[in-house]
Amino acid sequence: MDFILNPTYTLMLAVLVLYVGRILNKHIPFLTKYNIPEPVAGGLVGAIIFYLIHQFAGYTISVNKPMQDTFMLMFFASIGLSANFAKLKEGGKPLIIFLIAISFFVIIQNGVGMAIASAVGLDPLMGVVAGSIALVGGLGTAGAWGPIFETKYSVEGALPMGIASATFGMVVGGLMGGPLARYLIRKHNLASPLNAEIREENKDAPLTDSEYTFEAPQKVRLITADNAIVTLGMFAFALAFAETMKNLTIGTAIELPTFVWALGGGILLRNVLETGLKQEIFDRSIDVFGNTALALFLAMALVSLKLWQLADLAIPMIILLIAQSIAMWVFAVYISFRVMGKNYDSAVLASGLCGFGMGATPNAIANMQAITNMYGPSHKAFLIVPLVGAFFIDLVNVVVIQSILQIFG
């Protein structure tokens, strides 16, 4: 028997899941050390409870899908609304080189995933789910693409596979980045560790480059009611744009998932208002609403995972993710580090790449901060990685995924 929660109970459940996740993160150091988000920690507990209910009582509990989808679209709109293309000038040539290199990695990640998936008897598209969708894309992208792969491309288990892969990637990305950068620094004698007194002084220094970006959700944002109203209007425009474009492009060559149009609508509105009309954009409000939407969406998506669908995918998924971890290490050491100059900055960038290439931008920031606290600052890395990892690589990822689906879907 299936039970579908109404919007009120869905919201109540999502908030409860977030509080459970907060309690778990507070009392389990492992979760905090490797930047496991509260929605993941609490959501997996909820998913296990719902799994036990399904197995022993025969009931399947689902959340309100329209509400879940709305929060998903708000999150992707927040990415678009935060993407200021004028910032490309600040990063200069190194940012462009890094973005091009990582764009190639997105292709490699999907190539590895599809090859391994075929070798272990899975649908090759499952390799894309456990490739750039879950790893470069992260939990939000996995939660958005999963249902599309399941319904439109008949890839059974794509959602739980994507969520599991993204969670694995966050842990591995946090584990890999620091050791990899230290290996490069020592091998090439790029820097010496700072003494203990300097490290203690720098440990809690704020990262000004990411002070108001959505990858730092714990930062305090001072916003007003007027800011909030204007920002909600911007979100409404992005969602309306997404709905309109979805309806206009159905059955055409440019048909895209709705969340891609929401991201595009945010980018369009941000850059027209800021660059064309010289209007002030309230980044702090965008951050708050974007983070809130992501947390609630993930809580809803994770708590309604059908974990029983993962049983037959466990061994192939492990093989896939081990291969992806090896590919990440090889690319960071032998390609990214070299093309970015084989210097200290490029070693720090490589640690950031492991963070968002396998997990998410917060992992990248944490990896780089661990290295710079030990060896000294890298202003270039802290400028480039948030811009590429939080904004521009998402655009590249959409293009690559859509191209693969055109060919293999």
Image (tube, rainbow, N blue to C red):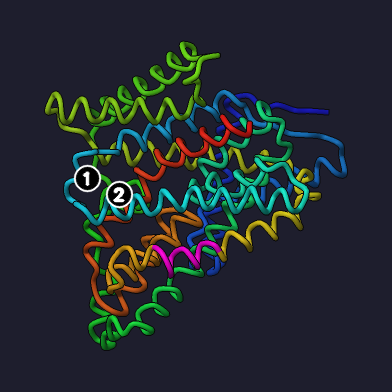
Looking at the image, is mark 1 or mark 2 nearer the viewer? 1
What residue is at 55 percent from the left and 57 percent from the top? 169
Magenta-colored span: 327-335
Q: Which residue is mark 1?
A: 88
The x and y percentages for residue 362 are 40, 56
The x and y percentages for residue 107 are 50, 48
| Extreme residue toward the front, this view | 407
Which quadrant of the figure contains the N terminus?
Answer: top right
**Callout 2 environment at 10 Å: few (<14), some (14 to 19), or many (20+)?**
many
| Extreme residue toward the top, this view | 248
Q: Which is more N-terminal, label 2 or label 1?
A: 1
Which quadrant of the figure contains the C terminus?
Answer: top right
The x and y percentages for residue 9 are 61, 30
- As rendered, which of 395 and 27 lies closer to the eye? 395
The amino acid pointed to by label 1 is Leu
Image check: 80 left or right of 123?
Answer: left
Mark 1 secondary-structure assignment: helix
The amino acid pointed to by label 2 is Leu
What residue is at 67 percent from the left and 30 percent from the top? 153
Mark 2 secondary-structure assignment: helix
**116 lies above or below 331:** above
Q: Quadrant of residue 84?
A: top left
Say whether residue 149 is magenta.
no
Image check: 82 left or right of 115?
Answer: left
What residue is at 35 percent from the left and 68 percent from the top? 338
**195 lies above or below 176:** below
| Number of numbered labels in the structure image | 2
**Do tag 1 and tag 2 residues touch (Cβ < 8 Å)?**
yes
- As rendered, which of 93 and 374 lies closer to the eye? 93
